[in-house]
Image (cartoon, grey):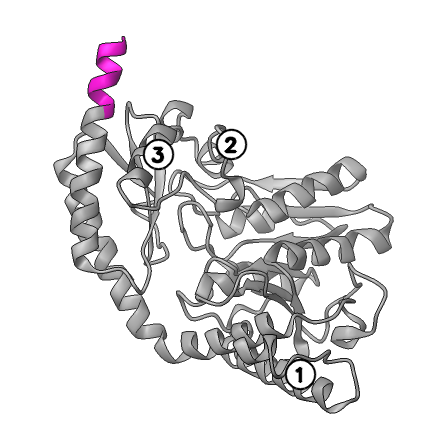
Amino acid sequence: MSVWLGPHHGNPSSIHAFGQRAREAVEGAREEVGRLLNAAPPEIVFTASGTEANNTVLRAIAEPRGFRGHLVVSAVEHPSVEATARGLEAAGMEVSWIRPDSQGCIDAEAMMAAVREDTCLVCLVLANNVVGTLQPVAEVASACRQVGVPVLCDAVQALGKISVHVDELGVDYLTLGAHKFYGPLGAAALWTAKRSEMVPLLLGGSQERRRRAGTENVPAIVGMGKAAELARLELQDRQRHVEDLRRRFESGLRTIPDVVIHGARAQRLGNTSHVAFLGVNNQSLLIRLDLAGFAVSAGAACSSGTVEPSGTLLAMDVPREEALSAIRVSFGISNSVAEVDSFLVALRQQVEDLRRLAVVTR
């Protein structure tokens, strides 16, 4: 990325040599993202975030219809889909919210049963961003195609962790974010099938084939392209590594009493473990673990700073008190077995201390 911040700096919309080199770099990155998705490069639109990409699709469906019509949305969506759908609902659209089972999984038949004649979009995330559960996107998309209803799949959390091919999923729109597969922050993309409606969210310029106005962030896009290449080439090794770490971690949790692993019986992303330590306040636990040198979360990073329980957990009918005792632990390719073992020691100690303090306080 560094050369595009310095000696090769240029606006890819310019016709001079600096601009044309930048254009070639952007298009090269588009090809790499296309290879990762098994998609045609022209179908990919670069955005600044997965949130922007999700908003683009929902508003592209709603605005031309005068905010009339019907959406089917799972209750385990990322806030960028959930909050936008609620905004459209307030503007006049009808929304059917499909709740998951106790493991955080959406039933495909329940999703399709909610589709009506006036349904204009179905939204189903590929992997939930809190618990990591995988959803039946291909099954839902296949059924939706038969009745002519488009499907938006938020694949931000999944890409780079599992194989994601747009032709196998059969969706109409798919969103992704570079930082989830070790690319730079502030780079993302929207894939749209050729048959799909596409109304720009941002207007003012002819960039991205008039589908997203604004000068492209060349360094970030180039970084995203390289990250996509590495994610495609290293996918299997990465999967095995993080799955081994998670198995070791969850096995080590057996030495801690009153622990609940959410979604343990479901198919999950290999790097994600969402665990409740009953009787422990998750915010206090996060602070103590941070001071000990371990970075975990209570859920999505975009929801940090809130003391409300995760909407995904509440939709799974997890009791509020249990939800407020839960943390999300994510493993990455740079983590080691030794780090997992050290984390388990620190975690066990902090949970014991917090439970002891709770007893004394009572």
Q: Earlier in the sequence, mark 3 or mark 1?
A: 1
Give the image location of residue 301, x and y in percent. Answer: 48, 45
Residue at the far left in the pictured view: 255
The residue identified by callout 1 is: 22
Q: Nearer the viewer, residue 288 or 147?
A: 288
Q: Earlier in the sequence, mark 1 or mark 2?
A: 1
In the rendered view, would you say 324 is above or below 160? above
Question: Which residues are the magenta region?
Answer: 354-362
Three-letter code for the amino acid on which mark 3 is drawn: Ile
Three-letter code for the amino acid on which mark 1 is drawn: Ala
> Is 322 positioned to the left or the right of 349 in the image?
right
Which residue occupies 36% across, 31% down? 282
Label 3 residue SS: helix
The residue identified by callout 2 is: 306
Three-letter code for the amino acid on which mark 2 is drawn: Thr
Badge 1: few (under 14), some or many (20 or more) residues near its Cα, within 10 Å?
many
Residue at the far front in the pictured view: 7
> Is 297 positioned to the left or the right of 79 in the image?
left
In the rendered view, would you say 97 is above or below 151? above
Q: Is residue 73 visible?
A: no
Which residue occupies 59% across, 61% down? 186
Q: Nearer the viewer, residue 216 or 47?
A: 216
Give the image location of residue 85, x and y in percent. Answer: 68, 44
Secondary structure character of the magenta stretch overall: helix
* Contact check, label 3 and label 1, Cβ < 8 Å: no
Residue at the far top in the pictured view: 362
Q: Which mark is residue 287?
A: 3
